[in-house]
Image (spheres, grey):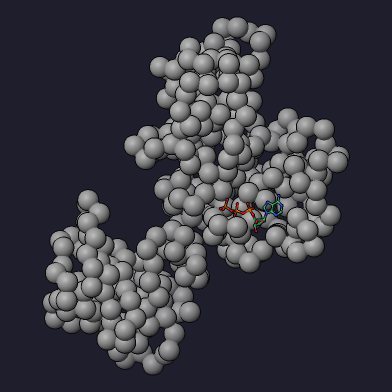
Amino acid sequence: MKRIFFSTMLKVRHLTFGYDKQPVLEDLSFRVSRGEYVAVMGESGCGKSTLLKLLYGALPFEEGSITWKNHPIKGPAYQLLPGGEYIKYLAQDFDLMPYATVAENISKYLSATDPEQRAARTVELMETMELEQYRDVKVQFLSGGEQQRVALARVLALRPEILLLDEPFSHIDHFRRNKLRRNLFGFLKKENISCICASHDFFDVLPFADRIMVLKDREILDLRHTDDIFEKPRTLYTAELLGEANLVPIEVLKSYASTTRNIIVYAHEFRISGKSGMPVTVKHTYYLGSHYRNYGVLDSGRGVYFDSEKPIEKGKKIFLNVSLETINKRMPI
Ligand SMILES: Nc1ncnc2c1ncn2[C@@H]1O[C@H](COP(=O)(O)OP(=O)(O)OP(=O)(O)O)[C@@H](O)[C@H]1O
């Protein structure tokens, strides 16, 4: 993957925060560059939304520092308007004007000095979020997913330098999500807007994010380029956020290896053989449209998920293989 080098815009140093005495996030340090998209992932309750609110300046913190282009972000007691002019935040609940139309909700935040430019920008943002047909509809009559798209268009109208998104497609149906993702992340790259996006959904992340931050137990467990994290996950926790991952004993894959350690293998990385490899008895086959996901057990009783092009009958014994290339790039754990 092409590596792009950006200039640092957001700097977080030793940030610690708790709603009460117990910290939710502890000693976080990282940087985000201009135009960069950093996805924040982790299990529910690990502090993704809390981190976004801290970066926005909406929560008071006592330990650590946050700076945006050398301006300190200090928290609600010090800032009248959270985020200032540069940082905009789209929370899970969106704060729209229900009695105004879609176009009015968006254009309200655009400069009124040049009406032609304002109208063109409103159209561009409606197109980006596929809202043209609702242009004159009052927001109160829109569905939850449509309102979320208006909220996204409106936050873009504010011309942020950094955009904080919390599960931005949570209300939007799968049918439309892919197109909107491409439009939104394409727009952010075109406008060189930095983005920090909390998401559970690896389709929001893998095709678009420059880096992934994994949060666990109050800390940053990992923060690397997207392809590095996916190809060389260091923990099963991380791999499971990004795909169907298994922990497989190395000695089962390579009989000559004398180690009790394991490697992570994604379901799509197994090759099925009728003759040799890791013996597995198939228990279930799930249809996924383009392929099948199977669940089987090793002789040791350990479960394994693996993909196949065709369904495999329950109870059948097959053999799984993993390429040497995959084995060699994974860190034993
Ligand atoms: N206002 C609050 N007061 C007290 N505790 C809170 C508050 N908001 C969140 N928490 C707690 O802080 C922790 C982190 O919550 P947060 O919402 O940041 O997690 P998250 O990773 O965004 O979760 P999810 O993926 O479910 O949205 C949780 O234990 C949560 O219960």
Foreground: 251 or 82?
82
Q: Quadrant of ligand 1?
A: bottom right
Residue that appears at 43% across and 58% down: 242
Residue that appears at 54% across and 11% down: 119
Residue that appears at 70% across and 60% down: 24
Q: Position of residue 186 (x, y in %)?
A: 47, 34
Q: Is residue 150 visible?
A: yes
Q: Is residue 13 visible?
A: no
Foreground: 12 or 88?
88
Q: Position of residue 17 (x, y in %)?
A: 76, 57
Q: How many marks?
A: 0
Left or right for 328, reference 224: left
Left or right for 298, reference 240: left
Placement of 101 over or under 152, stated as above or below? above
Q: Residue furthest right?
A: 78
Foreground: 109 or 148?
148
Q: Position of residue 107 (x, y in %)?
A: 59, 16
Residue 257 position by quadrant:
bottom left
Residue that appears at 66% across and 34% down: 88
Q: Position of residue 210 (x, y in %)?
A: 52, 49
Placement of 155 over or under 220, stated as above or below? above
